[in-house]
Image (cartoon, rainbow, N blue to C red):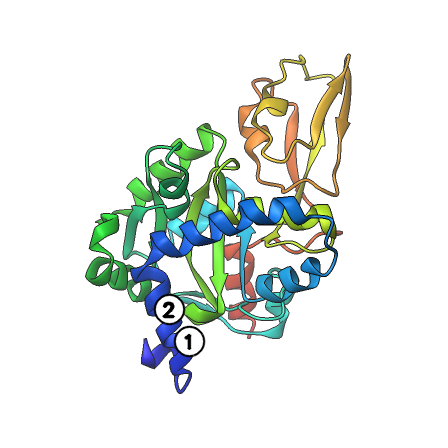
């Protein structure tokens, strides 16, 4: 931890406390958010939320971009102001995966906090740094090392349940990614915090959208409502056969695309949104220097 944070002993200590006391930490935040829901009228909370979110936030991933991360066989380290085009926050924007084949899964504190979502094992550490810390210090959350193939299967299984795949960034854990979680829209503290703050200020969010939007082919559509049912932020609906889609609020999570039985939906890179966390693009940029 000290090697990761240098002289910032406070951040190293926060890192240690955050993971070792993962469940009570998140449980406290979950309880705090429930209290804040009664105070959405209080405007000054929005700037406070932004200050926190600049230091701790998630980036929504499509399944294809998730697969690229979980099949890496080489180190990736991108530390640049350019990253803010992908991760649009002031701090915690480093994209680092060191020894990415070393993967550990453990219980999700959000799912533990609500007690209403199973299975619990949905938090995935990619890279020896965080993964070995979980194995050494987080035994109470049942960490176990897994192969890349099992990690992908875990993600796919949760996506079939409607869970959003996110890569998380946090100042206290070195300002970089390395943790990927399968987030239930009903119990994820991150997604709930974003929904709460958007009620006060639509420009404040803990959740950076994937960078994709969804195109629609009405000739292929046989309105079955599967896309509507699985959308985690309810930006899709039908008025008769007329499709209603809020592109601006869409996370670009790809869940609706995967559920569509007639291939009427397709992801596309949306130039009006932050860039996707696409490892192919990043590796090309690294090779170009």
Which SS class for mark 2?
helix
In the displayed structure, does residue 205 sit left or right of residue 78? Answer: right
Classed neighbour count for the residue bearing mark 2: other residues with Cα under 10 Å, few (<14), some (14–19), many (≥20): some
Classed neighbour count for the residue bearing mark 1: other residues with Cα under 10 Å, few (<14), some (14–19), many (≥20): many
Q: Nearer the viewer, residue 108 or 280?
A: 108
Q: x, y (%) of residue 29?
A: 48, 53
Q: Which mark is residue 15?
A: 2
Task: Give the residue furthest to the bottom.
Answer: 7
Which SS class for mark 1?
helix
Residue at horizontal 57 percent and vertical 36 percent from the top = 254
What whole-number distance in Å separates the C-alpha atoms at marks 2 and 1?
6 Å
List the residue tagged with mark 1: 11
Q: x, y (%) of residue 38?
A: 64, 44
Looking at the figure, which quarter contains the C terminus? bottom right
Q: Is residue 74 visible?
A: no
In the displayed structure, does residue 28 sit left or right of residue 134? Answer: right
Q: Are marks 2 and 1 in contact (CB under 8 Å)?
A: yes
Q: x, y (%) of residue 114?
A: 41, 38
Residue at horizontal 62 percent and vertical 67 percent from the top = 51
Looking at the figure, which quarter contains the N terminus? bottom left
């Amino acid at each position: 931890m000290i090697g990761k944070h240098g002289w910032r002993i406070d951040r190293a200590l926060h890192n240690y406390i955050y993971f070792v006391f993962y469940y009570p930490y998140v449980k406290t935040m979950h309880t705090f958010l429930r209290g804040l829901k009664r105070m959405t009228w209080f405007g000054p909370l929005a700037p406070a939320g932004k200050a926190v979110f600049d230091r701790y936030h998630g980036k929504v991933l499509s399944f294809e971009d998730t697969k690229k991360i979980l099949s890496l066989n080489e180190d990736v380290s991108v530390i640049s102001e350019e990253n803010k085009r992908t991760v649009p926050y002031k701090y915690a924007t480093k994209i680092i995966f060191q020894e990415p084949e070393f993967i550990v899964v453990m219980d999700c504190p959000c799912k533990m906090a609500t007690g209403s979502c199973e299975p619990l094992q949905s938090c995935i550490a990619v890279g020896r740094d965080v993964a070995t810390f979980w194995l050494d210090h987080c035994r109470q959350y049942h960490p176990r090392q897994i192969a890349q193939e099992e990690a992908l299967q875990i993600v796919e299984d949760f996506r079939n349940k409607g869970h959003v795949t996110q890569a998380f960034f946090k100042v206290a854990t070195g300002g970089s990614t390395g943790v990927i979680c399968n987030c239930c829209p009903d119990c994820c503290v991150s997604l709930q915090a974003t929904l709460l703050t958007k009620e006060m200020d639509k420009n404040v969010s803990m959740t950076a959208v994937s960078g994709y939007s969804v195109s629609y082919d009405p000739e292929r559509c046989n309105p079955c409502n599967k896309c509507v049912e699985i959308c985690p932020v309810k930006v899709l609906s039908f008025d008769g056969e007329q499709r209603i889609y809020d592109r601006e609020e869409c996370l670009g999570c790809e869940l609706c695309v995967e559920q569509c039985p007639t291939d009427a939906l397709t992801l596309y890179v949306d130039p009006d949104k932050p860039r996707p966390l696409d490892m192919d693009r990043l590796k090309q940029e690294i090779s170009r220097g």
